[in-house]
Structures are given as structure tokens and as C-alpha cells.
Amino acid sequence: MELRYPTSFQTVDIAVFTPDNKQIILCKKKGSDLWQFPGGFADPKSMSLEVDAIREIKEETCVDIDYPVYIGSTLIDDERYRGTDNAIKTALFCAHMVKGYPKAQDDIADAKLFHIKRIDHTMLVNKHRILWEMLKNHLTSERKPATISVTNRESFEIASLTSMLSRICGRIDAQSGTTIKEHILDPQINMWWANRKSNPNPQE
């Protein structure tokens, strides 16, 4: 008999802000009356969780985002795995909208923008209330990637993209972007890079 170890399934959830940092996207799954952060399972063939976050937002809300900033991770009390040895652990990211407007698709029944100050945890599904607390703690901490300036965020994004691609591209010239443009392999990152080049200052 083959031994099977308990499995931790990796997911991503994303708090997507408007450029002015005043609103975020929340989604409602089909058959639910409560809201939650957009997200989904990580793809075992993707290059990173950031790539998964970019893909999930596009698939569920039709929105293109800038490069996601990692906030933290946590165990999720997902009803599908209660009473089993398996569980879900999610990585929470924040990002900004750069193109498009929330429109529900895939398994999403509704996708809307909510003013950050008007969100109450009782609006959210139980399993995502811990993510709301993580986001609030993040926004009140000294590190605030969700509200940094465009110039600093641009530098952060280039540095993150450079680091992420270095494994497949070798030495990356972050100043010119030549190697990134010529050798990029992941279509989601390719889309992100094209958006950044066409709209380098999304907050302006």
C-alpha cells in the first residue's frame, strides 16, 4: 500500500487597489451571498505565485494589475477539506489596477469595487476574514507597498521582475529590458511587461 502524506494545497488571493488606493475589488462566488478576495489555486507549471496572482485576477475580473506585492500567508479554513488530512494555505498579495474594470467571469458571479473604509468583515466569507485582518495590519504597518509612490513602485517592480526571471534568462539587463523582451517565457509575465511599457505611470 502506497503511503499518502497530508497535502497542503497552494492558493493565491489578491487585494487589488484602484490607483488612488481608496477602493479594492471584491468578488462573489456563484451560490454565495458574501464577498471575498479574488484568487485561486496556484498552477504547478507557473514560474511563481506572483504569476498565478496576475493570471487569477485577469481570469476572474478581466482586470490587468501591476506586479503583486507579497503580504503574507495563512492557513485557510476551506469547507472542502474539513474533516480530512489536507488543507489550503494561501499567499496574500496586493496590487494596483492598470487596465480594465471589474467584470465577473470564470466561476465569479459578481465583481465590484468597494471603498476600503466601508468594508466590514461581516461582508466577507468566513475563510477570508483572516485575509481582511492581514490586509488591515499590512496597511497600518511601516511597510506600505500598496501606497508607495509610483517611482518607488516602478523600481520595486523592475527589481522583482529581474529577480524572478534571472533563473531562466541568465543575467538580466534591468535598465534596457533587452533580455527580458527577447527571452521571456511566461505569457502572463509577457502581458504584464507589455502593459507596463505601454502604461508606465498608471496612477497619473
Image: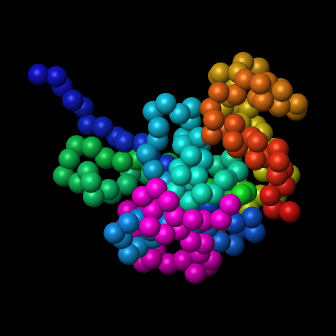
Above or below 109: residue 60 = above
Q: In the depicted view, which residue is nearer to us: 93 or 136?
A: 93
Image quadrant of residue 149?
Answer: bottom right
Above or below 21: residue 69 = above
Q: Residue furthest top?
A: 170
Above or below 57: residue 26 = below
Magenta highlight on residue 197: no
Identify which residue is drawn at 53% across, 33% down.
Answer: 46
Image quadrant of residue 35?
Answer: bottom left
Residue 16 lies, in percent from the top left, at 62, 60
Identify which residue is drawn at 63% across, 57% down.
Answer: 63
Q: Residue furthest bottom?
A: 118
Is residue 4 visible in the rendered structure shown here? yes
Quadrant of the image containing the C terminus: bottom right
Which region of the structure is painted magenta? 100-129
Quadrant of the image containing the N terminus: top left
Above or below 172: residue 92 = below
Identify which residue is drawn at 62% across, 77% down.
Answer: 115
Identify which residue is drawn at 74% across, 40% down.
Answer: 193
Residue 163 lies, in percent from the top left, at 70, 31
Image side of residue 31 versus residue 121, left or right: left
